[in-house]
């Protein structure tokens, strides 16, 4: 993809589109990112010993810092550099449980993990290694990551048909006439379906949960946690969190940008996200990193036909994350009350285009196709070892196959 492209599909002039598609894409990315993992982050923080107040503080801190980072990076580099919290890291925390020293020790581990990301950014060989991922492997890994989301609309129709079917139909109809606005339309319809269910206006929704804020509004507040440092916290939380963040978030995040034709500066981004984690950690924030799933929304052609204008999507998503952090009680009420599969379905509809593009790209590379397919199926399997996600192991497996093929061709 050329960054100087001025049309999408050869028939939509970039200048005729205006700023609204990237703005809407950014809002969509923030809704999907926040909505699809809010409960996981909350569960992870509470799992390692946070009180409800500390968990809310952590959500506010990590949401605000990742939003500010997205705005700064987007404006500075004019690239759609989407930032997120570490969802796999939060799942890791939930599985780890309370360690010796309680939440204060966990916060100490968050700080160490953030510092390790900074060190990784300052160590040039690692940055070169991240940028050296072959394009077919990067595209196949992206396709593998997106697959589970892209089949979510089908699962949602099966599980909650009265809520999901209108979302899917709305997306199809809007896509027929205005492809750029199909995903935002799906979000609006999903919110409408939730509202109807909350008021018992859908069949089978008589026992639906109350609407958000039914118990009254409370502003979230930051709560300082004095960190405690221990070797047990380093081994059980800090090192696994660092590895999960790098392998499952930062590497795929770079891959998404490269797959869409961008060359992001690895060292400043790693240092910046690591530093953001260091700022958020004493208030309960666990990890900030490059986004992978939502990055595909911001960096893909649906965000804007001109790649030079897609940074607006990342900046918008960052601003929305800051707002959602401030409005955490409302977001918590809405997201935890909504069926998770419905939120995943909206994400899947938004990512179908990115899945198709990345799949076509790696399947078209005849010489690397076998290695790319190994990367794809390994990533799509959800396979995890030592707390490190399938995206990393997909690259390892595909890279091994590619290296073996190249070695054989030279023999």
Image (cartoon, rainbow, N blue to C red):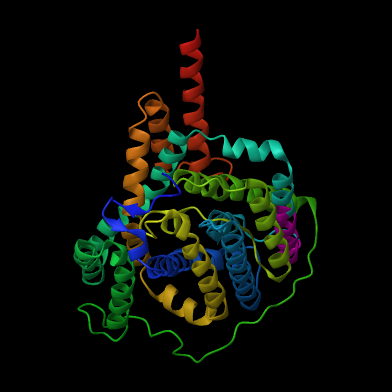
Position of 243 with respect to 370 (left or right) is: right
Residue 288 in percent (x, y) is at 62, 59
Residue 207 seen in the figure: no
Residue shown at the point (46%, 41%) measured from the top left: 383
The residue furthest top is: 411
- Position of residue 306 measured from the top left corner of the image (x, y, whole percent): 41, 56
Residue 362 appears left or right of 159: right
Residue 259 visible to an observer of this rendering: yes
Quarter of the image for residue 36 reads bottom left
Relative depth, front residue between 113 and 411: 411
Q: Give residue 26's quadrant in the image.
A: bottom left
- Asked if residue 229 is positioned above or below residue 324 in the image, the reply reads above
Number of numbered tags placed on the structure image: 0
Q: Which residue is drawn at 54% across and 40% down?
A: 385
Across and down, in percent, residue 362 comes to 37, 35
Q: Where is residue 281 in the image (x, y as percent from the top left)?
A: 70, 65
Residue in front for this viewpoint, 243 or 102: 243
Is 109 within the magenta?
yes
Of residue 268 and residue 191, the one placed in the foreground of this image is 268
Confirm whether the magenta stretch covers residue 24: no
- Asked whether, in this view, residue 368 is left or right of residue 195, the answer is right
Q: Which residue is drawn at 53% across and 81% down?
A: 327
Q: In which quarter of the image is the N terminus?
A: top left
Work out whether 78 lies above or below 254: below
| Prevailing secondary structure class for the magenta stretch in the rendered image | helix
Residue range (magenta): 101-114
400 w.r.t. 4: above or below: above
């Amino acid at each position: 993809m050329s960054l100087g492209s001025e049309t999408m599909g050869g028939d939509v002039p970039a200048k005729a589109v205006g700023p609204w598609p990237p703005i809407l894409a950014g809002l969509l990315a923030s809704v999907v990112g926040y909505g699809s993992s809010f409960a996981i982050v909350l569960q992870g923080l509470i799992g390692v010993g946070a009180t409800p107040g500390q968990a809310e503080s952590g959500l506010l801190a990590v949401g605000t810092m990742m939003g500010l980072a997205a705005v700064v990076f987007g404006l500075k580099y004019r690239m759609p550099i989407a930032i997120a919290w570490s969802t796999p890291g939060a799942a890791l925390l939930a599985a780890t449980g309370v360690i010796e020293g309680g939440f204060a020790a966990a916060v100490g581990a968050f700080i160490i993990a953030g510092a390790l990301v900074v060190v990784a950014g300052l160590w040039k060989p690692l940055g070169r290694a991240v940028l050296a991922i072959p394009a077919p492997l990067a595209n196949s890994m992206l396709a593998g990551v997106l697959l589970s989301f892209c089949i979510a609309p089908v699962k949602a129709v099966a599980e909650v048909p009265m809520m999901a079917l209108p979302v899917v139909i709305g997306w199809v109809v809007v896509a027929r006439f205005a492809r750029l606005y199909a995903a935002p339309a799906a979000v609006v319809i999903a919110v409408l379906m939730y509202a109807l269910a909350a008021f018992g206006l859908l069949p089978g929704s008589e026992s639906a949960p109350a609407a958000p804020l039914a118990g009254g509004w409370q502003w979230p507040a930051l709560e300082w946690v004095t960190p405690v440092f221990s070797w047990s916290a380093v081994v059980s939380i800090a090192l696994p969190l660092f590895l999960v963040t790098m392998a499952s978030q930062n590497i795929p995040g770079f891959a998404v940008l490269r797959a869409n034709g961008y060359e992001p500066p690895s060292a400043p981004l790693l240092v910046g996200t690591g530093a953001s984690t260091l700022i958020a950690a004493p208030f309960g924030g666990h990890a900030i990193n490059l986004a992978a799933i939502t990055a595909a929304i911001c960096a893909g052609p649906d965000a804007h036909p001109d790649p030079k204008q897609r940074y607006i999507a990342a900046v918008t998503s960052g601003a929305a994350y800051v707002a959602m952090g401030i409005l955490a009680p409302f977001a918590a009420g809405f997201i935890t009350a909504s069926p998770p599969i419905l939120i995943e379905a909206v994400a899947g509809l938004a990512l179908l285009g990115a899945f198709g593009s990345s799949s076509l790209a790696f399947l078209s590379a005849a010489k690397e196709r076998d290695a790319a397919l190994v990367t794809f199926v390994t990533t799509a399997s959800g396979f995890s070892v030592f707390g490190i996600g399938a995206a990393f192991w997909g690259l390892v497996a595909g890279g091994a196959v590619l290296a073996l093929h190249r070695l054989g061709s030279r023999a």
